[in-house]
Amino acid sequence: MLIDPSSLATLGGALALGGGLAGASVGIAKAASAGVAVLSEDRGQLRNVIVLASLPMTQAFYGLIIMILITSNVVDKLPATGGGGFAVLGLGIMAALAEFFSAAYQGAVCASGISLLPKTRGQILTNSMMLAVFVELLGVLGLVFTIMLMSMLGVM
């Protein structure tokens, strides 16, 4: 075979991790940028800023879980022929996109909540976290769907 299926699968896992890491970086940067502005107004909001700014980080862990599952469970089970490697690569791309966009947009939601912390004296924290969880759900679904589809392919 011209392209080794295990190499394609490993690339899919690496892309899933890369998407999670990149999305988390973008999301944290958005939220932390708003946090810096808020802290210049009210230093007492540091704890709340840290909580909201760190939420997009979880998608990096979801990408890591996907990569570990692919490299430890899937790569060895792929047949030498057929499209199994391409299928796992496709799943890695899907997971990368899910984790990237979930983290990036969760950062935007958290930035909005952070910007209102001084005005509400911190009372917006819980509501902001609840709204950020909706965006987080898409990252969780990216992880769950990837695992489910790998199982349906028979490589998990």
Image: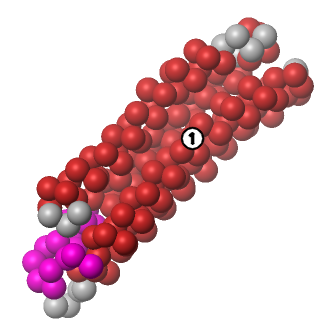
* Start-end of magenta stretch: 76-90
Q: Is residue 116 above or below residue 64?
A: above
Residue 2 location (% of width, % of height) = 20, 90
Q: Give the residue displayed 57% in from the left and 40% down from the top.
A: 56
- The residue positioned 66% from the left and 18% from the top of the image is 125
77 is within the stretch colored magenta: yes
Could you say where residue 3 lies in the image, as x and y percent from the top left?
A: 23, 86
Magenta stretch: residue 44 in it?
A: no
Judge from the rendering whether residue 86 lies leftward or rightward of residue 129; answer left or right: left
Q: Position of residue 138 (x, y in %)?
A: 38, 37
Residue 16 in sight in this render: no
Task: Name the quadrant of the N terminus.
Answer: bottom left
Left or right: 21, with 149 as reference point: right
User: Which of the 4 image quarters holds residue 90?
Assistant: bottom left
Rendering quarter of residue 31: top right
Q: In this view of the protein, which residue sits in the foreground, 34 or 141?
A: 141
Residue at position x 53%, y 34% from top? 106
Could you tell me the amino acid type at mark 1? Pro
Residue depicted at 78% across the width and 29% down the height: 47
Q: Residue furthest bottom?
A: 1
Q: Which structural element holds mark 1?
A: helix
The image shows residue 105 at horizontal and vertical percentages of 50, 35
Q: Is residue 91 visible?
A: yes
Please state which of residues 152 and 20 is positioned toward the viewer in this rendering.
Answer: 152
Query: Does the magenta stretch mainly form a helix, a strand or a loop?
Result: helix
> In this figure, which residue is indicated by the disc labeled 1?
56
Quick one: label 1, few (<14), some, or many (20+) residues within 10 Å? Answer: many
In this rendering, is residue 145 above or below 86?
above
Q: Is residue 67 positioned above or below 44 on the image?
A: below
